[in-house]
Image: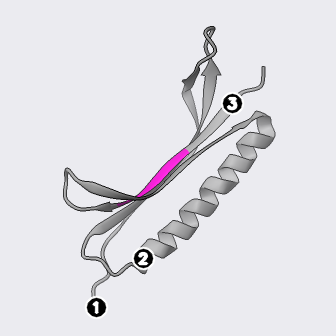
Amino acid sequence: METVYSLEGWVKEVIDNENAEILQRFDDNGTGEMGKRTLVEMAKSHFGFWRGYCKQLDTENKTAVYVHVYANVVLPNGLLCRKEHGSVYRDLVVIEPRRE
């Protein structure tokens, strides 16, 4: 059975240490080596676009962009479970608000 890979991520506006508003969420899956490569390309593209976009936001709050591609294990009952040490690609940036 081919490995199933998942892309998860988000863009958040950080209100304070306990609260954040989700501006965008990413959630895609793929199988095999081609699926893995495609998800990594998508993650890098999302990350680059949203990092640049958030730098231009006119807000007083920080924003954060996070993407993660990881491998899953198919359990005997058919459910997907995140594979231990299965991280393929991960990136995070916290962007300070623009000051003029």
Q: Main secondary structure of the magenta part?
A: strand
* Residue, far bottom: 100
Residue for badge 1: 100
- The label shown at residue 55 is 2
Check disc 2: other Cα within 10 Å, few if <14, some if 14-19, many if 20+.
Answer: some
Q: Residue at x 61, y 13 (%)?
A: 75
In terms of depth relative to the viewer, which is nearer, 15 or 37? Answer: 15
Residue 11 lies within the magenta run? yes
Q: Nearer the viewer, mark 1 or mark 3?
A: 3
Residue 58 lies within the magenta run? no
Region rendered in magenta: 8-12
Indicate whether 29 appears above or below 54: above
Check disc 1: other Cα within 10 Å, few if <14, some if 14-19, many if 20+.
Answer: few
* Badge 3 amino acid: Val
Residue for badge 3: 4
Place residue 93 in its image quadrant.
bottom left
CA gap, disc 3 and disc 2: 33 Å
CA gap, disc 1 and disc 3: 46 Å
- Are circles 1 and 3 on residues that touch, CB within 8 Å? no
Work out whether mark 1 precedes mark 2 in sequence or the reverse, and give the earlier one.
Answer: 2
Percent across and percent down for residue 95 are 36, 68
* Badge 1 amino acid: Glu
Work out whether mark 3 precedes mark 2 in sequence or the reverse, and give the earlier one.
Answer: 3
In terms of depth relative to the viewer, which is nearer, 83 or 77? Answer: 77
Say whether residue 54 is left or right of residue 48: left
